[in-house]
Image (cartoon, rainbow, N blue to C red):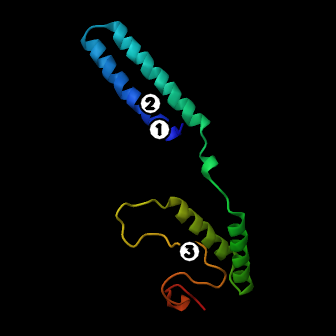
């Protein structure tokens, strides 16, 4: 079962358990209130168990070919005279930017390019590289 579905199911049990404890207390029935409290506690333990057992790393796939291609492109830029530390800092910042990106519903013009990997020497975008304000020849 998908952990997301199980978490939502546990949330429903939480809400039902709290409602059951309130109703049991209003009806002055300690047995009902304690029963719903125990069910809610078991649901909390299940939620902790599911969270600890499932790992986000199982969905991460590392593309070795893309990494080698990127390293080759970095080496080409270094050979062309780029400063290695500045280039590595730029790549690190690009990775952090990519990790912090979130989908925004209804945002026009923010869709990612389909050609995720431009080859060495290729430029993504609408115009030549020299039109970029930070480009230095």
Q: Nearer the viewer, residue 69 or 91?
A: 69
Q: Earlier in the sequence, mark 2 or mark 3?
A: 2
Residue drawn at x 40%, y 27% as measured from the top left:
13
Marker disc for residue 5: 1
Question: Mark 1 Cα within 10 Å, few/some/many (few <14, many 20+)?
Answer: few
Q: Name the quadrant containing residue 107.
A: bottom left
> Which residue position holds label 3?
115
Q: Is residue 40 above or below residue 95?
A: above
Vertically, is 44 above or below 70?
above
Q: Give the label, 2 or 3, closer to the camera.
A: 3
Which callout, 3 or 1, points at the residue further toward the start of the chain?
Answer: 1
In the image, is residue 78 above or below residue 109? below
Circle 2 Cα neighbour tier, 10 Å, few/some/many (<14 / 14–19 / ≥20): some
Q: Which residue is mark 2?
A: 10
Residue 41 vertical position relative to residue 90 in the rendered view, above or below? above
Task: Say what secondary structure mark 1 lies in.
Answer: helix
Image position, residue 91 (x, y; %): 62, 70
Farthest residue, direction front: 1
In which quadrant is the N terminus drawn?
A: top right
Q: Where does residue 72 sit, x and y in percent of width and height?
A: 73, 76
Give the image quarter of residue 61.
bottom right
- Secondary element at tag 3: loop
- Per the model, the C-alpha gap separating discs 1 and 2 is 9 Å
Check whether the beta carbons of the residues at disc 1 and disc 2 lie within 8 A of each other: no
Q: Percent position (x, y) of residue 126?
A: 48, 85
As helix, strand or loop, the secondary structure at mark 2 comes to helix
Point out the image quarter for the C terminus.
Answer: bottom right
Name the residue at 27% across, 8% down. 28
| Precedes in sequence: disc 1 or disc 2 | 1
Numbered label attached to residue 44 = none
Classify mark 3: residues with Cα within 10 Å, few (<14), some (14-19) or many (20+).
few
Residue at left 43%, top 32%?
Answer: 9
């Amino acid at each position: 079962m998908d952990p997301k579905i199980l978490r939502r199911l546990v949330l429903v049990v939480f809400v039902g358990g709290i409602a059951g404890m309130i109703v049991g207390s209003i009806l002055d029935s300690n047995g009902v209130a304690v029963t719903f409290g125990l069910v809610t506690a078991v649901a909390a333990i299940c939620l902790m168990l599911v969270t600890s057992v499932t790992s986000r790393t199982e969905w991460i796939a590392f593309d070795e070919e893309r990494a080698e291609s990127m390293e080759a492109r970095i080496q080409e830029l270094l050979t062309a005279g780029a400063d290695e530390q500045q280039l590595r800092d730029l790549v690190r910042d690009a990775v952090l930017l990519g990790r912090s990106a979130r989908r925004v519903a209804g945002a026009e013009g923010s869709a990612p390019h389909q050609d995720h990997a431009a080859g060495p020497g290729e430029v993504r975008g609408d115009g030549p590289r020299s039109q970029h304000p930070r480009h230095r020849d």
